[in-house]
Image (cartoon, rainbow, N blue to C red):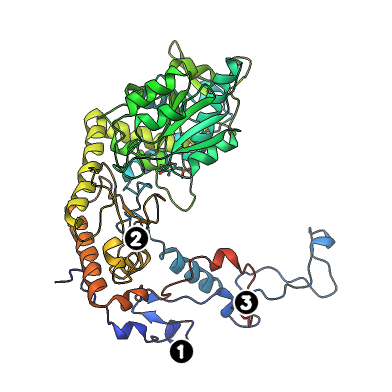
């Protein structure tokens, strides 16, 4: 088989230390051409070297303007380095980040798609970027108008009636949605006790239910990967506050019974919460509100043009049916005549669950999302969903047989394989994921969802070209071949990065927060 990424497993040369950093010898400073291995700052510099120039305090005098108790004699163990060394160190490290702007990033469930730079540019317009969240409404009508339009658009896309923009992430939106559900039940005299969840649920779902004081009851999905009405009917009582579903679910499979499930839940007075992190698959094609969903959170950072990862700012607006709108958190944006206003006073919305965060929410995300929705228009938004599904199914079709598909059911925007075929040779999902790095690809999500042993969950998103998907497929095929021909070699992958296979958990279990020269780290 040809290996289109051009990489051969026995690249001995890669294992040899290269010349040292900036020409100097030493294991801590190899280069690969102009790609540098990096020493710690603590390993650099020389005594007395300094990166700042401050006026010297003459001997015997006290530093001006500084309270005496804040002046230290000196600081032990800090690296003594020049400004240029600091700049190079951090600039090099910054280029080590893998991001969607540098390569394919097929993390299932995370929707790591390219976000157009036009959205970025608009979010940086001074009138948006500099607007003060405490500015009076008459001075920020444009910003409020944008929020109002986004609120309308998100309600429409979900097939629901009102949307709160302020939650700051998907999980925060779930928390908010469940608070709204709880407030709804309390207004009827009983908050109820339980929340139902399928076994394919994202971990944030049970967490959000528990944080709202609910017991979580897990429902088993069927061998076809779907939740079936019988399981819900058996569990549904008047003690159940809500069911939480994501559709398509975390296997990428559409929950075809959702309408019937919603009817079962509603018949006992329960509500249907949809985890909207997978909205990318449905955009402009199907509306959760039409499926019987009462509450859904969006992940703007997954679905609408906000870069994410690294914990960076997200946005998780929550859309609800009209009957739940009074419970939405503040602020909410309203239009009165031709003017826009934020409702912030709880006296105006006495049934609101209150504030979930300061000010308006992550406003720049609203700008990006609205810019994308306007740029794409209704047809472009629908095209997004269709292409996301097409791309995932392309990968699915091309890798079927090479990797095992635990569910035969057609998938939508993401596809889950497992390592069953490779396990016969002792090769695991971890080995496959690590070898992908050698081929120049970020690994997909692995070992999630938990219902699939050794899951490899691939979500290409709509923004990738066929050529990229073909290269990825070829790398996966090459790895499957290698798993047969030389399984042991795969346990050592990756070999091309400076740091080979790292201990997955040591940094969390034995963190070294303060390194000192000469310190031994086991
Ligand atoms: C990403 C994701 C979440 C959580 O969203 P955050 O913005 O990371 O808090 C919840 N559910 C599903 C299915 C997801 O993919």
The quadrant in which residue 371 appears is top left
Does any portion of residue 107 appear in the rendered image? yes
Name which of mark 1 and mark 2 comes first in the sequence.
1
Quadrant in which residue 439 is drawn: bottom left
Pointer 3 local density, CA inside 10 Å: few below 14, some 14–19, many at least 20: some
Residue at image point 37% right, 46% down:
109
Q: Secondary structure under badge 3?
A: loop
Could you give the CA–CA distance between mark 1 and mark 3, rounded to whole angstroms?
A: 20 Å
Q: CA distance from mark 3 to mark 2?
A: 38 Å
| Vertical relation: 437 (above or below) 220 | below
Q: Is residue 1 left or right of residue 448?
A: left
> Which of 138/432 is in front?
432
Q: Nearer the viewer, residue 259 or 88?
A: 259
Ligand 1 contact, mark 3 (Cβ < 8 Å): no
In this orientation, which residue lies closer to the viewer: 260 or 252? 260
Q: Marks 1 and 2, how far apart in space?
A: 33 Å
Q: Residue furthest bottom?
A: 25
Mark closest to the chain's N terminus, 1 or 3: 1
Q: Nearer the viewer, mark 1 or mark 2?
A: 2
- Choose top left, top right, bottom left or bottom right for residue 57: bottom right
**Mark 1 vs 2: CB contact within 8 A:** no
- Residue 494: x and y in percent read 36, 73
x, y percent for residue 289:
36, 23
- The residue pinned by badge 2 equals 443
- Judge depth for marks 3 and 2 and give the one in front: 2
Residue 376, position as x, y percentages in the image: 26, 34
Residue 463: x and y in percent read: 25, 47
Which residue is label 1 attached to? 25
The residue where tag 3 is placed is 80
Relative depth, front residue between 180 and 146: 180
Question: Dot 1: what SS?
Answer: loop
Q: Quadrant of ligand 1?
A: top left
């Amino acid at each position: 088989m040809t290996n289109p990424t051009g990489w051969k497993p026995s690249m001995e040369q890669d294992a040899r230390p290269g010349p040292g950093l900036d020409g100097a010898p030493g294991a801590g400073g190899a280069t690969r051409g102009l790609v540098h291995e990096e020493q710690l700052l603590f390993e650099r510099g020389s005594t007395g070297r300094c990166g700042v120039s401050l006026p010297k305090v003459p001997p015997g005098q006290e530093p001006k303007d500084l309270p005496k108790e804040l002046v230290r004699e000196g600081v032990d163990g800090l690296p003594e380095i020049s400004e240029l060394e600091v700049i190079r160190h951090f600039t090099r490290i910054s280029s080590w980040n893998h991001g969607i702007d540098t390569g394919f990033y097929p993390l299932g469930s995370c929707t790591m798609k390219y976000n157009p730079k036009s959205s970025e540019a608009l979010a940086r317009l001074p009138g948006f970027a500099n607007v003060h969240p405490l500015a009076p409404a008459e001075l920020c009508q444009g910003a409020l108008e944008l929020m109002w339009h986004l609120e309308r658009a998100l309600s429409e896309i979900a097939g629901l009636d009102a949307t709160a923009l302020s939650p700051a992430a998907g999980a925060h939106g779930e928390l908010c949605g469940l608070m709204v559900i709880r407030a709804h039940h309390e207004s009827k005299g009983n908050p109820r006790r339980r929340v139902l969840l399928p076994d394919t649920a994202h971990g944030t779902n049970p967490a959000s239910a528990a944080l709202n004081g609910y017991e979580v009851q897990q429902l088993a999905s069927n061998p076809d990967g779907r939740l079936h009405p019988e399981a819900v009917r058996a569990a549904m009582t008047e003690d159940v506050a809500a069911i939480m579903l994501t559709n398509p679910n975390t296997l990428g499979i559409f929950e075809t019974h959702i309408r019937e499930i919603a009817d079962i839940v509603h018949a006992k007075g329960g509500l249907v919460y949809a985890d909207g992190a997978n909205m990318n698959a449905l955009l402009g094609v199907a509306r959760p509100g039409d499926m019987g969903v009462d509450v859904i959170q969006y992940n703007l950072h997954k679905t609408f043009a906000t870069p994410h990862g690294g914990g960076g700012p997200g946005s998780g607006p929550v859309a609800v049916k009209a009957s739940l709108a009074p419970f939405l958190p503040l602020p909410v944006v309203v239009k009165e005549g031709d003017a826009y206003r934020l409702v912030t006073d709880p006296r105006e919305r006495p049934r609101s669950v209150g504030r979930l965060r300061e000010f308006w929410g992550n406003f720049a995300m609203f700008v990006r999302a609205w810019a994308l929705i306007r740029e794409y228009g209704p047809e472009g938004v629908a095209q997004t969903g269709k292409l996301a599904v097409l791309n995932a199914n392309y990968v699915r079709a091309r890798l079927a047989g090479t990797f095992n598909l635990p569910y035969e059911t057609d998938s939508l925007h993401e596809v889950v394989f497992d390592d069953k075929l490779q396990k016969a040779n002792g090769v695991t999902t971890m080995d496959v994921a690590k070898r992908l790095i050698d081929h120049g690809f970020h690994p997909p999500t692995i070992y999630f969802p938990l219902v699939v042993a050794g899951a490899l969950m691939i979500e290409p998103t709509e923004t990738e070209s066929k050529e990229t998907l073909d290269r990825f497929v070829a790398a996966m095929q090459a790895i499957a071949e290698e798993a047969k021909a030389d399984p042991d070699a795969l346990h050592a992958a990756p070999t091309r990065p400076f740091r080979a296979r790292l201990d997955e958990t040591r940094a969390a279990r034995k963190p070294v927060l303060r390194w000192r020269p000469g310190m031994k780290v086991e």
